[in-house]
Amino acid sequence: MTNQLQPPLSYHIDPTIYAGRPTDSSGRLPKELRTYDLLDSLHISYERVDHDALPTIEACRQVDEILGTPMCKNLFLRNAQKTAFYLLLLPGEKKFKTAALSKQIGSARLSFGEPEFMEQLMDLTPGSVTVLGLMNDAENKIRLLIDRDVIENHAFIGCHPCINTSSLKLKTQDLITKILPAIHHDYTLVDLPDVK
C-alpha cells in the first residue's frame, strides 16, 4: 500500500466582506445571533465573512487573506483532574507546547478539553471554539489566557461568532477593553515561545 498525500480539502468561502451582522438571520443559530447582539450592544464595529464550516486553523487561511488579519487559535484546555478549564488565545501561526504554558500558569499537565465540557461551559462545538464563547460562561469556570504576541503585535483578531460558518475581524483593543469586561472575564497574559 502506498502512502499518498491527500489533496487539500476545498471549502466554499464567500469573498464578500460584510459590515456587521447578517441582514437575514434565517438559518442562523441562536448562539451566533447572541454574539451579534453582544457586539451591537457594545457598539463594536466588526467585519464578517461567511463560508462553509472551517474545522481547523489551516482551513481558515483563505479567510485570513480576505479579512486582512490572521485568525487566532482558540484552544480549549483542561487540567488532568478535569477541574480547571482554560481558553488559550494565540496567533494562528504559533505552535502550542503544553509544557511552556503549564509552567506559566502553575498547572500540572494540560490536555485538550472534551467536547462535552466545551458545550456545557461555552455552548460551543469542536471547530467553533472562540473567545466570544466566553459570553456563555456565566459562572466564570474558564480562565482566559492570551499570548502576549496577540496583544502586542495584532491590532485585529479573527475569530468565529460561536459557529464556524462565519468569521469576524475585531479590534484587539475592543476585545480587551469592551467585550471582556462586559462578559465579566479577565485574562492572564502568557508568553509562549515561538517554536518552529
Image: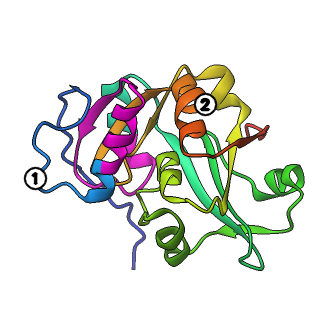
Which residue does the image show at 34% across and 32% down from the upper left? Answer: 40
> SS of the residue at dot 1?
loop
- Residue type at numbered disc 2: Ile
Vertical arrangement, residue 155 with respect to residue 15, above or below: above
The question of residue 150 being in magenta is answered with no
Which residue does the image show at 48% across and 58% down from the upper left? Answer: 136
Q: On the image, which quarter does residue 90 sit in?
A: top right
**First in sequence: mark 1 or mark 2?**
1
Residue 99 on image: x %, y %: 83, 57
The residue tagged 2 is: 176
- Residue 26's disc is 1
Pick the front one: 114 or 33: 33
Vertical arrangement, residue 1 with respect to residue 189, above or below: below
- Residue type at numbered disc 1: Ser
Quadrant of the frame with the C terminus? top right
In this rendering, does residue 8 appear at all?
no
Q: Which residues are magenta?
A: 34-60
Which residue does the image show at 55% across and 50% down from the upper left? Answer: 74
| Label tally | 2
Graded by Cα atoms within 10 Å as few (under 14), some (14 to 19) or many (20 or more), the crowding at tag 2 reads: some
Does residue 147 appear left or right of residue 66 in this picture? right
In this rendering, does residue 172 appear at all?
yes
Residue 7 on image: x %, y %: 30, 55
Does residue 157 appear left or right of residue 34 in this picture? right
Colour scheme used in the picture?
rainbow
Quadrant of the frame with the N terminus? bottom left
Mark 1 and mark 2 residues within 8 Å of each other at the beta carbon: no
Distance between the alpha carbons at the discs numbered 1 and 2: 31 Å
